[in-house]
């Protein structure tokens, strides 16, 4: 049903433009995340330019969200009684895309608090692996949404849920560990933010797979 609705909506000029903007939101979120992941893993130095670029992208995502939301409301006003279910789905998706940007900014806070890359320690490898896998979740999420491919959406849904559980496992292990307070706090925040990003991406994938009442 989602694919048929999307295909029908894409034939309308306003909604075609909206889908392009939604794709841009998701791709901008992926760019933000890549910048922070590169800094946290030491692939790129953390700099003022990185900070500025992350905030620039986030402002662009927020502008797109407001613009898309405005267009959806105007569309429903101009065509009352039509496209309500899919409009609710799209509202949910743009909110998830916006939250990905906000949480990625939180990861920037972690990177700046620790001066860049993860310090050597017992959680270094696990966090790097989680970062890489969450970053890898962006492409199938965008692809599933833009093509309405349920198979890709289902894969993203399962992978995102598994990643969230692995992030929880890091936090559970920290409860039994004796890391210095600063390291424990920064590791906990990283795991928590990675979980949130993976679940917001999972929500987007669920829009392709689930009926409206089961999204989110």
Image (tube, rainbow, N blue to C red):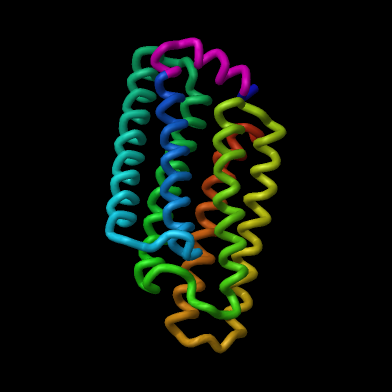
Q: Nearer the viewer, residue 96 or 75?
A: 96
Quarter in which the C terminus is drawn: top right
Residue range (magenta): 3-16
Residue found 45% across the figure and 16% down from its top: 81
Q: Nearer the viewer, residue 214 or 96?
A: 96
> On the image, which quarter does residue 39 sit in?
bottom left
In percent of width and height, residue 156 lies at 65, 43
Q: Judge whether 38 appears above or below 74 on screen.
A: below
Residue found 61% across the figure and 62% down from its top: 129
Q: Judge whether 154 appears above or below 103 on screen.
A: above
Q: Nearer the viewer, residue 84 or 7?
A: 7
In percent of width and height, residue 200 lies at 52, 47
Residue found 53% across the figure and 66% down from its top: 191
Dominant secondary structure of the residues highlighted in magenta in the image: helix
Judged left or right of residue 70, residue 197 is right
Q: Judge whether 116 appears above or below 27 on screen.
A: below
Residue found 57% across the figure and 19% down from its top: 5
> On the image, which quarter does residue 78 sit in?
top left
Judged left or right of residue 85, residue 74 is left
Q: Is residue 174 a member of the stretch shown in magenta?
A: no
Judged left or right of residue 62, residue 42 is right
How many numbered marks are there? Answer: 0
Judged left or right of residue 122, residue 109 is left
Q: Is residue 11 a member of the stretch shown in magenta?
A: yes
Quarter in which the N terminus is drawn: top right
In percent of width and height, residue 38 lies at 47, 58
In percent of width and height, residue 160 lies at 63, 50
């Amino acid at each position: 049903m989602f694919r048929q609705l999307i295909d029908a909506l894409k034939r309308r000029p306003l909604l075609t433009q909206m889908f392009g903007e939604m794709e841009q939101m998701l791709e901008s979120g992926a760019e933000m995340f890549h910048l922070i992941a590169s800094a946290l893993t030491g692939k790129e130095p953390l700099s003022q330019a990185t900070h500025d670029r992350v905030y620039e992208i986030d402002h662009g995502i927020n502008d797109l969200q407001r613009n898309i939301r405005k267009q959806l409301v105007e569309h429903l006003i101009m065509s009352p009684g039509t496209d309500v279910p899919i409009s609710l789905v799209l509202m949910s998706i743009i909110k998830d895309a916006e939250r990905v940007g906000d949480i990625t900014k939180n990861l920037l806070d972690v990177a700046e608090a620790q001066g860049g890359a993860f310090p050597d320690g017992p959680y270094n490898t696990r966090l790097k692996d989680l970062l890489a896998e969450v970053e890898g979740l962006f492409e199938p999420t965008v692809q599933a949404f833009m093509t309405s491919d349920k198979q890709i959406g289902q894969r993203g849904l399962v992978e995102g849920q598994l990643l969230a559980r692995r992030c929880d496992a890091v936090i559970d292990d920290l409860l039994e560990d004796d890391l210095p307070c600063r390291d424990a706090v920064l590791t906990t925040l990283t795991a928590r933010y990675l979980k949130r990003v993976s679940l917001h991406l999972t929500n987007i994938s669920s829009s392709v797979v689930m009926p409206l009442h089961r999204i989110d």
